[in-house]
Image (cartoon, rainbow, N blue to C red):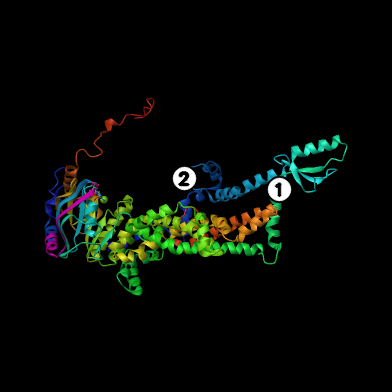
Amino acid sequence: MSDTAMNKPVGLPALPSYLDQSDAVRARFERLKQREVILKVDGLNKVFSSGQRETLALSDISFETHRREFLCVVGPSGCGKSTLVRILAGLEEHTSGDVLLLGEPVSEPGRDRGMVFQGYTLFPWLTVKKNVMFGLEVNGSGAYEAEKQALQWLQLIGLEKFADAYPNQLSGGMKQRVAIVRALANQPRILLMDEPFGALDAQTRSRMQAHLLEIWRKIDITIVFITHDLDEAIFLADRILVLSAHPGQVQELIEVPVPHPRSSAQFISPEFLATKARLEELIHKGEAPDEEDSGTYSMVARMTDIADDID
Amino acid sequence: MALTDSDNAMRSEPVGVVGPGDAAPLLEKRDGATLRPTGAGKARNRKGWFQVLRPLTPRARLLLGMLSFVLPIAAWCVVSYVPYVWHPQIAITDPGATDYLQVGMRMNKAAFDDVVAEAKADHKAPPQGYASNPIYLPAPHEVAAAFYTSFVTPPATKDQPWLHQSLWHSIQVIFWGFVISSIFGVPIGILCGTYAAFARLTEPFVEFFRYLPAPAFGALAVAILGIYDGPKITIIVIGTFFQQVLIIANTTRKLDVGLVEAALTLGTKRFQLLWRVVIPGILPDLYRDQRILLGWAWTYLIVAELIGTTTGITWFITQQARYQHFANVYAAIMMIGIIGLGTDMLLALLGRRLFPWERSLDKSA
Ligand SMILES: Nc1ncnc2c1ncn2[C@@H]1O[C@H](COP(=O)(O)OP(=O)(O)O)[C@@H](O)[C@H]1O
Ligand SMILES: [Mg+2]
């Protein structure tokens, strides 16, 4: 941790710049950037055409992620985060530009890119263990080998007791953990996650974040993580890609100055707050002023009974 | 290091979490109603019957389910056993001096009163009788007795079938009609639901054909397939198949696309999707559709059996009606209902065993 950061009293308006990095953090980023590039997106455009209307959802998106990097993508709702990650997964075609995974262009879904969706998408007819075995089996592993590996993965997330339960017997957090190891069991090069914890309650959510970081530290995986929760993004990410809306464009690629290993105590550290301030600034700038909620509260008529003078 | 910590924290999260063996408690918890203390529950349940889109308590379900049978039977009992609720006719017990009345004959009250008045005017013995319902409405006990007697009464001639043989014949016609329809209808329906191109190629014609009344093909079927079971099975197939394709196609289309996408990102090849995701994903709903369609197949039975030589339960019904054994007619009609409902309940039970993952989701059935 840098001296300047340590000496600054917490909570005062004079935050360090989010660009200030301690030596350890700077060294970490230098090492990170020396690792091989796993995913390279270059000049990516996406146009949705429905009937005569054409919507430019993504415009000239370029970025790179390095091996074992944790990249978060944030942006206002509707800015094309899901579209971007679906293109990376190969579930959606892009209009122009390049998406290269280890130098190979991405055109359709494949086992080298795992994906975790917000809606769990576990196969309800398969037990937890069989869900984790699914990817291995469709890729030609023998049942015995697949089962052995599935059990190891379940052990990693502490769900081996639930191996023979069906997904609908699990809580949301457990389902999402299974979905994560189901994707990881295939040993993808990159794990794509589209607001995976968006449907969870706050407590489960923060536990899941800590858990995901643990998994990420233990295995060789690059993660692209979509979220609209800025705290989540700062807590998890090495770097944060900030998109603006209409069309979705890269505003900034922020190197998070919060040192590793992460802990929830860091939520009030100056680096964290500085980063958050910067993100908020970008997101608010990126939000179109006349969005759906342009109306202010003055438009809401006071509809309570006149006689009730509670306030 | 932190993994073990957070690990334990995770395990202590189990709100609504159950071990593999105990799905049942979860089901009850979701139901909510079953957890209520009985004392407080009673007052709430009565109001609860009219809650919009809310499930009933198991007791209320059972009670109402039984009432749905008890009420019509009770109405029937009242009409049959309470005099002058209806009883528009007089059954003759003694013709008196008249020469055109016979014992057991029924006539309208007004006509009977005229005859009595006439006899009295002529100072002859008036006919006697008791108020009764028309012969086509037998009393419940008569129909109940017919459930037994119609099975043990031998057929009029040796070459005619017993009732159980007629019933068995009907069941076979239904069975083969439904099996043949399903052999084609289920795969075509699934393909339609899975591949939009296939659906576009098939469904417009199927939509058209399903409006054609199946019995309209009766004469054609006889001309092609003869007078025995061929045309009957054909009618059931025509009546079922086209609906089947459309219903199953729609069920297939309702599958969560997310599951298909998840499978794709796990490296599933496109040709594997059908077996690996689509079919297992829709199986419980497909099974439910098949149960409904089997019910529809039964409704085509009577028309089907009238085609060519009349056979099966339809033959029994028409014979008994001809001899005015209406109690037997009612009994035979009810047997169809009982067999149909019975099969469906058995299939529902079987379904719960076949699809254990549906159990804690299943609110009805
Ligand atoms: N299939 C589609 N057809 C047309 N427009 C789409 C489609 N999917 C997304 N869009 C549009 O693209 C934009 C980005 O959507 P999305 O990627 O879902 O945003 P986010 O995930 O950031 O909320 C939105 O304006 C949305 O209306
Ligand atoms: Mg989205």
Q: Disc 2 marks which amino acid?
A: Leu
Q: How many marks?
A: 2
Q: Give the side of residue B256 with respect to residue A190, left or right.
A: right
Q: Is residue B165 magenta?
A: no
Vertical side of B91 occupied by B254: above or below: below
Q: Position of residue A295 (x, y in %)?
A: 25, 34
Q: Which residue is mark 1?
A: B135
Residue A311 image position (x, y, % from top left): 34, 30
Q: Is residue B330 left or right of residue B274?
A: right
Please state the horizontal and vertical placement of residue A178, each as a whole percent of the image. 33, 61
Tell which subunit mark 1 falls on. B
Q: Which residues are magenta?
A: A28-51
Q: Quadrant of residue B312?
A: bottom right
**Residue count near mark 1 (Cα–Cα under 10 Å), binned few <14, some 14–19, many ≥20:** some
Q: Which mark is residue B53?
A: 2
- Residue B44 in sight: yes
Residue ID at (78%, 48%) = B104
Report, in whole angstroms, how far the alpha carbon at label 2 lies from the one at label 1. 44 Å
